[in-house]
Amino acid sequence: MMAGSIDLKWIPRGLGLGLLAFAIFGPLTNLLLWAFTERWYFPHALPLEYGFSYWANVFSPRGNATTSLIMSVLIASLTVVISIGLAIPAGYALARLRLPFRGAVLLILLIPQAFPNLPVYVNIARIFYQFGLNGTVLGVVLVHVTHGLVYAVWIATAAFSAIDRELEEAARSMGASALRTFADVTLPIAAPGLLASAVFVFLESLDEFTGTYFVGAPDISTLPLLLYTAGSGGNYQIASITAFILLIPSIAFMFVIEKFMRADVLSKVGR
Amino acid sequence: MNAYLEIASTRVRYGEVEVLKGIDLSVGKGEFVALLGSSGCGKTTLLRTIAGFNTPTAGTIRVDGRDVTRQPPDKRGMALVFQSYALWPHMTVDQNIGYGLKLRRMPARDASARVAEMKSLLGLDALGQRKPGALSGGQRQRVALGRALAVNPDILLLDEPLSNLDARIRLTVRHEISALQRRLGITAVHVTHDREEAMVMADRIVILDGGKIAQTGTPQEVYNQPNSDFVAAFMGAENILDVDVVARGDSMEIAAGPHSLRATVHRPGQAAFTGKAIARFRSESIGVADASDDTLGTKSGGLLLKGIVEQVSYPGGLWRHVIHLGDNSVIVDAERRFEQGAQVHLRVPEDRLYIFPAHRA
């Protein structure tokens, strides 16, 4: 009697969604478990003991995590400042002026991503060595900027292209100089797009491993480098906790994108 | 009238295309001039050139005797109202209207008083804190106007500001704008493709055709004395007849045709000529009578035509007839209805008939 009212068509769909959820949340759950595990070994399905001792360890004054976190945030912030500082004039020029090699310029920015990372960074490390940039914050920041500039310039170009020229002309007509127009009209309207690209660059820098490893290690230690060391040393607790710290900004970023990025800006990326 | 805004032999080119081919125009202080023309005639380009967004390749633009041709838009003392309104989406209505005052470093108290004055003038009192996105088309249009008027511009430039409004709102806004312009004594240049809008609002109409001025004059002049076939057609004289004319002193004699009688017309201010010609007239003020009725024929003057009623409709006010004249059809309005198929006589009064040489096509 009751069986007839259950719609069997939901079963495959439910299974599909279940698998998808497992694929997304399974690793995260494992991460969460390891982060709070004190003792866990084969053949036990779940940790034998939970606790915060590794957290205390990671954030203790002698632990490397705090310095790595501060270094990561410092490098990411500098990368954002330099990338956005370059992307605002570059994006405006690419969006507004009739540049002869507009397409080529946008493409050139992609080139560092177009080749395998390792040979590029090995060579960068070799060149930076000559200038004494290896193992310095500036060196790492420069590597991150070449990476972040792609997103920053592409998104800034899209953000400026999406602004109706007449909005700027209206300001000129009301008596604003070109610079004043940019400050009062263009920049505020482009701000959400620029903010999104800043967050994106920040996350990319926070996450970056290869370049940092070749140019920065061992003098510069960022969270991904710490994660690598902890992971290869078999210390899953430290690795999981570090991964968690790296996860928080990503989630924040999703909300920012959701709130500020308008469809008309996204549709102009790369045009 | 002394010229306040003066445009002298101005040419503008976009790449290979010359959009303005030598424009000469002067606008007096406090005058309302409408630039009228179909799309692509260069009217918006001319307005943008006056505003400073296009640089002429030749010619000069002067305001009150001062050469502004090479000056940037922000130094010209003009305010442009855009067709799209171009309100800044990140600013409230108050901030939009007050922006020009802020640029002029007006003290905050005076500026907010001026903004309030503009809002009450334009009926925007309750909307000061809204963003443009939350306004209707008519309200946006008024904010755009308020923003331009707040700074007391020397010259107000209007780029089809009414074309995005509903037909009904458009009629009222038309009168509001011209009343405001007269009250404030502002010099205004208004671009439109709507003939009636230009007629109702402007002191003087400038008709543009292919980057050149076709005719300049008061609404009555361009309506009643079009100087070219183009202007006559643009001003609504859409009935066309091909005729042969012979100059007789300062009058012209129209040869009799299969559907028309011989007629002599005298057009003041137009030189008589001989040859193939186009005769144009409007559907209004045409005498219509049954063919059996002699009253039209006995009146002298004007062109007498004979035709058959092909179609009758009632658009309101007058009856509209499509009348067949051999290969041609003309549209004629009459106070009473003439039945379909009826033989009728038409009399086009002399002063309603515009005759121009036929194109050598």
Image: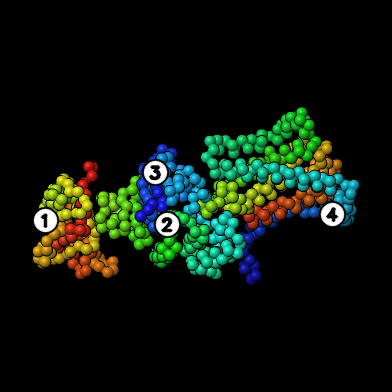
Q: The residue tagged with tag 2: helix, strand or loop?
A: strand
Check chain identity for marks 4 and 3: say if they share one: no
Q: CA distance from mark 2 to mark 3?
A: 20 Å
Mark 1 residue type: Leu
Q: CA distance from mark 4 to mark 1?
A: 108 Å
Q: Nearer the viewer, mark 4 or mark 1?
A: 1
Residue A5, compared with residue B162, is above or below; it is below
- Residue pictured at 37% horizontal, 50% vertical: B26
- Residue pictured at 52% horizontal, 40% vertical: A98
Within 10 angstroms of label 1, few (less than 14), some, or many (20 or more) residues?
A: some
| Residue B187: image tag | 2
Mark 4 residue type: Phe
Q: CA distance from mark 1 to mark 2?
A: 49 Å
Residue B22, compared with residue B262, is above or below; it is above
Q: CA distance from mark 4 to mark 3?
A: 79 Å
| Residue A36: image tag | 4
Residue B290's spot in the image, x, y percent? 13, 66
Q: Nearer the viewer, mark 1 or mark 2?
A: 2
Residue B307 shows in the view: no
Marked residue chain, label 1 = B
Residue located beneath label 3 in the image: B10
Query: Sequence order check: which comes first, mark 2 or mark 3?
Result: 3
Residue located beneath label 1 in the image: B261
Mark 2 residue type: Thr
Within 10 angstroms of label 3, few (less than 14), some, or many (20 or more) residues?
A: many
State the residue in front, A15 or A130. Answer: A130
